[in-house]
Image (tube, rainbow, N blue to C red):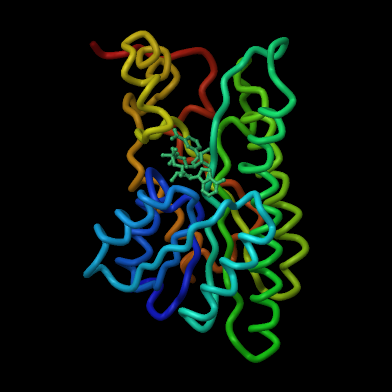
Amino acid sequence: MKLDGRSAIVTGGAKGIGLAIVRRLAAEGARVMIADNDEAAGAAAVESLSGTGEVLFTATDVSERLDVHNLVAKTVDAFGSINALVNNAGIVHAADFLDLEEADFDRVLAVNLKSVFLCGQAVARHMVKQIEKGEAPGSIVNMSSINDTFAIANQVPYSVSKGGVSQMTKVMALSLAQYGIRVNAIGPGSIMTDMLASVADNPDVRTRILSRTPLGRLGEPSEIASVAAFLLSADSSYVTGQTIYADGGRLPLNYTVPVKE
Ligand code: NAD
């Protein structure tokens, strides 16, 4: 197994893409700490994964520094070390630019971008201490989006936050390369989770999405989890500072493709 004996934190791991990543990392032999602010979903996730390896949950708001420090301390207590971090937690807020409230801008930026700094710095500081004691360097994956490059008019803070996540990935990779710690991002296209379900159920929206998706279908959370497993494993040992787009071909596409009924 690719991640045998490794220990990982997955933020936003109670549902959606994060839960698929937790499942995949556990199947690859990792011990996994789910960090999520939805306690009921976190408990249900741990329950659903009993028998798939060691999966624990810590209630965490990733935008709060004290929560993040508690998360790191609890993970070290439980697993002894931290070898992998997936900064996956994210939220959206739809509003036209002229109507957007300052508090909503701040909230989305705090959960989607500041959390990558808070969790990334706290975990990287711990990884550096481990390396100084002779342990192997770890790896960090940040969840970006095709909206780091594209923009959606009524998703102002989301698009801005994801642009920031891809830039954060580059600066973290450059800063941590001296320790051998690798940092990469994943840029998913449209993936079937709760975040997308409300809009993708609408036939017009579905057609709009598929007309921009050369593979002709929405993505599955497991198809993002497999990229995360690759980026956290030794299979990607010479890859750092990259955003890998798992988007069914949307980013290279100009114009649209035909949609099958
Ligand atoms: P989701 O809403 O299904 O899951 C998000 C998880 O994050 C939930 O478990 C939620 O409880 C948790 N979360 C929210 N705020 C939090 C906070 N403050 N602290 C801790 N946890 C918090 O969403 P998803 O579709 O699985 O998205 C996961 C990531 O993938 C996000 O960063 C999202 O931007 C990104 N992404 C998703 C898509 C898509 O199409 N679904 C596309 C591109 C990028």
| Residue 244, x across and y down, in percent | 54, 46
Q: Nearer the viewer, residue 8 or 179?
A: 8
| Residue 121, x across and y down, in percent | 71, 63
Question: At 59% from the left edge and 74% from the top edge, which residue is drawn?
Answer: 73
Give the farthest residue toward the bottom: 133
Q: Nearer the viewer, residue 194 or 42?
A: 42
| Position above or below: 109 against 100 | below
| Position above or below: 16 against 169 | above
Question: At 39% from the left edge and 72% from the top edge, which residue is drawn?
Answer: 30
Q: Nearer the viewer, residue 127 or 248?
A: 127
Q: Residue 54 occupies which quadrant of the picture?
A: bottom left
| Residue 170, x across and y down, in percent | 71, 52
Question: At 47% from the left edge and 68% from the top edge, which residue is drawn?
Answer: 233
| Residue 213, x across and y down, in percent | 41, 24
Q: Nearer the viewer, residue 202 or 166?
A: 202
| Position above or below: 110 against 55 | above
Q: How many marks?
A: 0
Question: At 49% from the left edge and 71% from the top edge, which residue is drawn?
Answer: 234
In which quadrant is the N terminus drawn?
bottom left
Q: Residue 130 occupies which quadrant of the picture?
A: bottom right
In which quadrant is the C terminus drawn?
top left
Judge left or right: residue 228 versus residue 193.
right
Judge left or right: residue 119 versus residue 167.
left
